[in-house]
Image (tube, grey):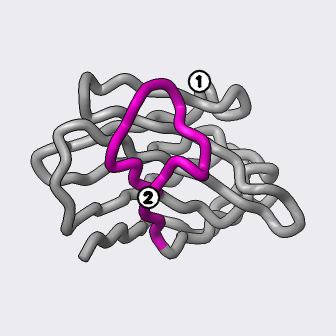
Amino acid sequence: EVQLVESGGGLVQAGGALRLSCAASGFTSDDYAIGWFRQAPGKEREGVACISSRDGSTYYADSVKERFTISSDNNKNTVTLQMNSLKPEDTALYFCALDIDYDLGFPKPYEYDYWGQGTQVTVSS
């Protein structure tokens, strides 16, 4: 059974930092991608960052470039999202997702096969 478990969310003041982790298990693939998405109340799900297991290529939404960093430990199937200089508009439920048959670029939400339950990030002003 494939499982994605997020951790690390919480409440932080604007300008602060949080680190989210996604532990993926129960799958076998030599070419996959793990992405982070977020969804705020009343808004569509937004892709935040993605990393490929193939070569470690990373992709970011413009809104988080220079502030967020995605990294992976392929041996442990764990992906981390380091979020710095947080803003109130970063407040959302953050999900990680697994594209088990990765092609290229930053996959759209419908291309991911498995999703975690999400972890809440709240940034106060």
Q: Please give the residue where the numbered disc 1 appears in the rendered image.
A: 66
Q: Which residues are magenta?
A: 97-116
Side of 75 where 107 appears, left or right? right
Q: Residue at x 53, y 37 (%)?
A: 107
Amino acid type at mark 2? Asp
Looking at the picture, does residue 51 appear above or below residue 24?
Answer: above
Return the residue found at the far right.
42
Q: Mark 2 packing: few (<14 Cα in 10 Å), some, or many (20+)?
A: few
Does residue 104 belong to the magenta stretch?
Answer: yes
Q: Please give the residue where the numbered disc 2 appears in the rendered image.
A: 113
Q: Secondary structure at mark 2?
A: loop
Q: Mark 1 packing: few (<14 Cα in 10 Å), some, or many (20+)?
A: few
Looking at the picture, does residue 64 appear above or below residue 96?
Answer: above
Residue 3 location (% of width, % of height): 31, 72
Q: Residue at x 29, y 26 (%)?
A: 56
Find residue 71 and report its image quarter.
top left
Residue 98 location (% of width, % of height): 39, 53
Residue 118 location (% of width, % of height): 54, 70
- Pair 1/2: label in front: 2
Find out whether the residues at labels 1 and 2 contact each other: C-beta distance under 8 Å: no
Which badge, 1 or 2, comes first in the chain's sequence? 1
Q: Which label sits on residue 34?
A: none
